[in-house]
Image: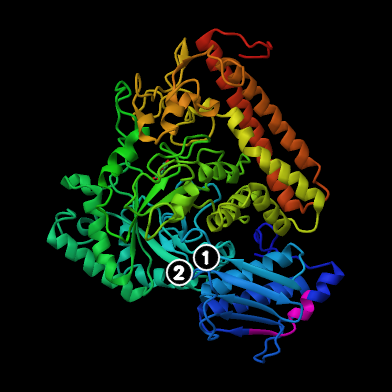
Amino acid sequence: MDTKMYNMWLQYDSINNQTLREQYTEFFSKVRLIGNSEIFDSIKEELEIAVDKMLQQKVGWTASDDAKIVIANSSDWNIKAVEGLNEEGYTIVSNGNQLKIIGNSDRGALYGVFHLLRMMQMQESITTLSIKEQPTNPFRMINQWDNLDGSVERGYSGNSIFYENGKIVEDKTRIKDYARFLSSVGINAISINNVNVWEEETYFITKKYLPEIAEIASIFRGYGLQLYLSINFASPIAIGDLETADPLDGSVKNWWKDKVREIYDFIPDFGGFVVKADSEHRPGPFSYDRDHADGSNMLAEALEPFDGKVIWRCFVYNCLQDWRDRSTDRARAAYDHFKPLDGRFHSNVILQIKNGPMDFQVREPVSPLIGAMSETNQMMELQIAQEYTGHQIDLCYLIPQWKEVFSFDTYIQGEGSTIEKIVAGQIHPYRHSGVVAVSNIGNDENWTGHTLAQANLYGFGRLAWNPSLESETIAKEWLKQTFPQNNDVEQTILDMLMSSWPIYENYNAPLGVGWMVTTHLHYGPSIDGYEYSRWGTYHFADRDGMGVDRTKETGTGYTEQYEEPNRSMYNNLDTCPDELLLFFHHVPYKHTLKSGKTVIQHIYDTHFEGYEQVLGLQKKWDQLERVLDEERFNNVKERLERQRLNAREWRDQINTYFYRKSGIADEKNRTIY
Ligand code: GCW
């Protein structure tokens, strides 16, 4: 496939600007690669694709000293590592006659090449450059939630590109293209199977699947990504012949040691395991009265000799809660389980913590566990897949949400202890840390279902590389590469992207309370869908008011998990920010927000407004009909119409529900059913 949809941000559109064309043509007439590896092969191939498409020319490869472009790994060129840059860093220096890309590793060189190609796609001059770049986060990882039957848990873009009908796909072209996309934005690790490891996938770590998984690993290796597998904690029972998976049992330890050795025979640079244990019915150490340090350390010991890692998820909570029980608070769970274990984890264990304490809602506070463990490696988990943010039917550019998370100040070590610094390992001396996200891709021709959802995948990579990039900057970069050479298109889509998360929030569950979604599916409203369920996700609306009391005095005490001044800020009704009010407090419908509106009027206003705003998005998009290719235009048009219907349903159900509960009329007398 070679359509605009398929190529995402690697369009490599033909360069029309004559001056730039001549400039680029000159540079690419003599290119020298100093390096010899799978990654250098990828560099060569990528340049050939890009130069052919952008300039309709062949790269002039040379081995001579007068090359116009030189691409090298500093160690191969016998020059000192580029000073002040980490192993993945690179420099691009150009004086008009010669342009040099020097990486501190092959991977660094590859990132430098993608940087240059980005500049060319954005039509920037490359004659005078002095660029020094390195990633802020050591780990920049993607989790696939793909199953062997070809389905993708929470996937909204078709089926898996990795598996179909119970087999690993034979044609691996898409996997390779995916590797190119990921590496072009600096992703350096990937786990390729669902964290819910079902029966057959448990065998991924056996000879039955390892040869083919090794093939996939080598595709990713060529693009600088290390391959990880999600494992079933009960493997020694499920696929071994042991009767226990007790992490302190000697035979279990040995079983894993042998298993790990076998994996490394197939994949010498295997990354390690991702583990979902004691979470939503997955097996784990609790079955044996062991804790999560015991469980993860046992695997860590097996992986250690090979420099492998255990990425251990903290999404551990009681999913069999009785809704009558007001003392259990799901938001507290991760902190309550893990914080007491600080200091007990091996140095190759990394805890993977979701950005919020609940589950990827449109609005949540930041998880108080992030940064709360000074002696335990941590990374933050985001969800690019739009499970609760519109299933890639509704437009929701997530970068602004993630930016808020990154810039949140935890005060864990005084002012300035932001999430950005914590996960980059700048607050506590973590050995390993970074960011990981659940992917949003599938085998749809445009990869992401909604073509504009490509921006979230792109943006995740760019933000993981450099969390201080602005949302707008990222969107513009993505637009210039994805829809090249049209300023009107750029401005229109930029406006749409930047307004999309607030719009989605407007018609969704109000003021941080979350949920209210159709159960299991998680698209569309069902206000009481989870209210009397076992999942621990309640809004407690009655005729007087709504919200979850998580205060110290009268609620669950969740606010105590934050450092001051956040603790008091959230605990105190007067200082709690409006957008999170109902996450932390139960208030009457006539409670006045900082905005001056009552809660009930805010609900009515935002829901009417949200719907109107979707109509606005449709209008904007329609203006692009004549300037865009038909495929992408129609794809988004169709999605926007479905978004409109969804927003309408949310608007009317939420407004009607709360009108009926409260009996309070809308000040503006609009139609409520
Ligand atoms: O939000 C829940 C999802 C599950 C998912 C789980 C998790 C992979 O609804 O589908 O399972 O989170 O993160 O483990």
State the separation of the CA atoms marked 2 and 1.
8 Å
Image position of 128 (left or right of 183): right
Q: Position of residue 658 (x, y in %)?
A: 53, 15
Q: Do the residues labelled 2 and 1 touch (CB within 8 Å)?
A: yes
Q: Tell me which residue sits at (68%, 86%) in the image.
A: 61
SS for tag 1? helix
| Sequence-wise first label, 2 or 1 | 1
Q: Which residue is drawn at the image coordinates 48% and 51% (left, top)?
A: 421
Residue located 62% across and 30% down the image: 647
Q: Is 83 rendered above or below residue 547?
A: below
Residue shown at 37% from the left, 42% from the top:
369
Residue at the front extreme of this rendering:
414
Q: Is residue 244 one of those drawn in magenta?
A: no
Image position, residue 505 (x, y; %): 58, 32
The local crowd at label 1, few if under 14, some if 14 to 19, many if 20 or more residues have their Cα within 10 Å, is: some
What residue is shown with label 2?
Answer: 216
Q: Can residue 403 be seen in this view?
A: yes
Q: Is residue 458 left or right of residue 563?
A: right
Q: 385 and 184: which one is in front?
A: 184
Ligand 1 position by quadrant:
top left
Q: Position of residue 147 (x, y in %)?
A: 41, 54
Amino acid type indicated by mark 1: Ile
The magenta region covers 24-32
Residue nearer the viewer, 509 or 197 = 509
Residue 425 to residue 51: above or below? above
Residue wearing tag 1:
175
Q: Can residue 536 be seen in this view?
A: no
| Element at label 2 | helix
On the image, the x and y values in percent for residue 596 come to: 62, 17
Q: What amino acid is at disc 2?
A: Ile
